[in-house]
Amino acid sequence: PPHAPATIRREDYQQPAWLVPEVALDFALGLEATRVEARLSVARNPAGNGSPTLRLAGDGITAESVAVDGAPHGAWKMDGPDLLVDLPGEVHEVTIVTWTNPAANSQLMGLYASNGMLCTQCEAEGFRRITFHPDRPDVLSIYRVRMSGTKAQFPVLLSNGNCTARGEGADGTHWAEWYDPWPKPSYLFALVAGDLVANHDTFTTISGRTVDLNIWVRDGDQDRTHHAMQALKDSMKWDEEAFGREYDLDLFNIVAVSDFNMGAMENKGLNVFNTRYILADPDTATDMDYDGIEGVVAHEYFHNWSGNRVTCRDWFQLSLKEGFTVLRDQLFSQDMGSEAVKRIEDVRILRAAQFPEDSGPLAHPIRPDSYQEISNFYTATVYNKGAEVIRMMRTMVGPERFRKGTDLYFDRHDGEAATCEDFVKAIEDGAGADLGQFRRWYAQAGTPRVEARMDFAEGVATVTLTQTVPPTPGQPGKQPVVIPLRLALFDRASGANRGEELVVLREPSMQVSFAGFAERPVLSINRGFSAPIALDAGQATADLVFLAAHDDDPFARYEAMQQLVVQHLIGLVGGAMLCQAERDAGREAIGRALEAVIGDPALDDLMRGELMILPGETYLAEQLAVADPGVIHEEREGLKAWLGAQLRDQLIALHERASAVPYGLSAEARGARKIKTQALVYLAAGAPEVAADLAVQQYDAADNMTDRQGALMVLAGLDTPLREVKLAAFHQRYAGNALVIDKWFSLQAGSLHPRVVDHVKALSGHPDFTLTNPNRVRSLYMAFTAPHAFHAQGGEGYRMIADLIVALDPINPQTAARFVAPLGRWRRVEPMRSALMRAELERIAATPGLSKDTFEQVSKSLG
Ligand code: ARG
Ligand code: ZN
């Protein structure tokens, strides 16, 4: 078996022994061979350990030469991947020449080739694949970059900061020099060279400076960059107003690349994006894609302050920049569109992606204590729970005081590599709050559970709140956390409430009383999802029906609908002995609530669409210690079918009404498209023939991707000959458009069709499929891990994902490791499937030469 990679611990942090105030890089660019000459000005750190040895990290590179202060230096040596140079004095200049082969770099970390262009990804530890360097975020340098290459191959040469000079060389080459005046860590370095065209625009900052904006894409894609450009300008303006942050260079470049491990990267002045988060037009992008672009463009832009101007001391502090920046992009998107809908979407993502992390073998606090491979910690916990934790601080102190806290944070730590503790302290000082106990949110993993029970006697409603934080790997015992709960009590007769209160639960349990009610009120709690907890409010079905119809907090209304369905389905699958009458009553209540949602004239369609979405299978499974995914799927589909059949006429009418709304990007038009496909989803379960007809109609009439994809998704799950016809038509229409072909793979892999496993097997051999493009891999296999087919009874789904991990690991370990988590949930699955999942994990673990990335995830999953 492979031996375990070293574990890095947060408590072992030490100041760097050497600082690197300046870096000069000279690239001789070639797709198959790029020469890199790095000149590092190094200075002994007075706060360091005083070691005369300069230790520079490397990964997969060798030094061709090393010089110190201009003279060749023979006395360097390697220590594993690191290069060591002994230096006699306090200040030196170390020059190192290395070579890399970007075309062979299938990991997509460091310098790599994508479609004939060169680009970089350095976060977290990719810079060491380009040249030897301390490559840790607390070493900040001013970068000067020179690059030269063939003009024909690389007409555009970009790096961070501003272009200071360019010129022609011999034999059809040219060169450019870039200078970034802002000191930055190596993970923010970027270089792009290729045949690109720009959509150019400008933005005038609040102090009157004009910033040139460019979005660089392949020729032919310019017309699909307008939404991203608008999002960029909106973000720049919003950050000035909402957080007082102004842009600090005269140039802001974005480059879209089609081979990219993640969503995008905030390199200083040169953001690099997955094409998926840049390119959009109505014919090829859905409304969700449009929202994704707006959110990610904002996210990367906001990093300029939360991440770049103030960066992280070490990678344990990742949530310092990611949690905060996610919160900032969420608040931005709330302001740009529907606040209520955005909040609901964010909670849905948290529950679908983060809650399972928190309750599984890979659970970690938002500020982890240790890691083997940091790439494995770019998680929903660090990002999304991290955002929720900061949102709670904002809820407790209020937006104005919170802003005072963030102003102080930016002011106090500008130009520094800071810690999560620095952030909390700044909020504490700036907002004037005591966040002592609150800090436990940074240290403890696991989703706190809160039980709320209301007693009513003599006009007084007493709410008893009890919290427990469940044990997680390495953290058997937990302390109570600070839980801000927005709460309201509704008068049943009038349907009104007496205003909202913020109750802060700090102890294991507490009671709050509210007097003056004529009858027992209805409790609405954790409104707006004010705390990222699992709540058991023990509400009666009648109360949930009431809140689903009357709650004036949109999230709480959504939550009541969800809870209605969760309680019903968990009652069915959780082994509760329900008689037929109880089952029927639960179903009827949901049916009436859904009918009210469909018909409520006061609801806008975007919100109506949210309220119509049933809780997902993963979230349902989360409610049980051990779940049978097959039964959950059956029961959920059964309910959907019953609702579709019961409300058939209303759903058909809804589809018809929405179909009359012409295409546009207004909330009204987007809402219409959302409920149109929602209606089809229910009909597909309850009245498949009707759904097939309507879906074909919708597909044929579609003048936009949202309608087309929605219709095709429904058809892909049905057993109708039209399924093949429309899938083929779609493929033909979009042949060559990678992002749309990704959708074509996803639709089939995530479909409700009974033979999905066979489909995915066949698709993995399709000429358009490749393991070298992460978007394509995810489009086929991530979609597949979500639904029932992954949990196919014989274990074929598990085997397929394990085979993928084994095949992908040598090519792209970062992406391969992402597929371990679905198998890692084996302890929470019924015994038959559990054994099959575990066996696949063991098979992966026994594979020789496993990457650090996959090794860490698999060994932790096996526990
Ligand atoms: N900092 C980037 C973002 O969230 C993510 C980059 C992560 N890259 C990686 N290879 N782990 O905006
Ligand atoms: Zn980020």
Image: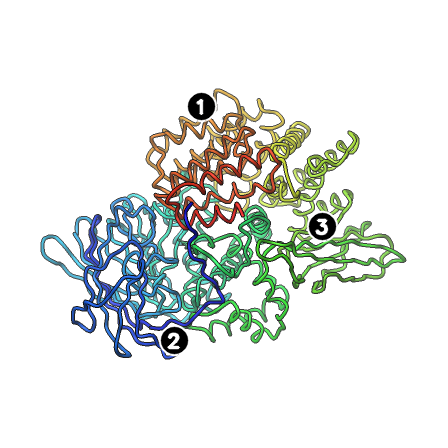
- Looking at the picture, tell me which residue is in the foreground, 84 or 520: 84
Q: Position of residue 282 (x, y in %)?
A: 42, 41
Question: Closer to us: mark 2 or mark 1?
Answer: 2
- Determine contact: label 2, label 1, CB under 8 Å: no
Of the image marks 2 and 1, the number of the one nearer the N terminus: 2
- As helix, strand or loop, the secondary structure at mark 1 comes to helix
Question: Closer to us: mark 1 or mark 3?
Answer: 3
In this rendering, the answer to whether 341 lies above or below 586 is below
- Looking at the picture, tell me which residue is in the foreground, 676 or 796: 796
- Determine contact: label 2, label 3, CB under 8 Å: no
Q: Amino acid at mark 1?
A: Glu
Query: Is any atom of residue 500 visible in this view?
Result: yes
- As helix, strand or loop, the secondary structure at mark 3 comes to strand
Ligand 1 shows up in which quadrant of the image? Answer: bottom left
Please give the residue where the numbered disc 2 appears in the rendered image.
48
**Residue 536 marker:** 3
Q: Spatial distance from mark 1 to mark 3, Cα to Cα?
A: 45 Å
Of the image marks 2 and 3, the number of the one nearer the N terminus: 2
Of the image marks 1 and 3, the number of the one nearer the N terminus: 3
Q: Amino acid at mark 2?
A: Gly
Q: Position of residue 701 (x, y in %)?
A: 47, 30
Q: Is residue 13 left or right of residue 765?
A: right
Q: Spatial distance from mark 2 to mark 1, Cα to Cα?
A: 66 Å
- As helix, strand or loop, the secondary structure at mark 2 comes to loop
Q: Residues within 10 Å of mark 3 (few under 14, many from 20)?
A: some
Please give the residue where the numbered disc 1 appears in the rendered image.
724
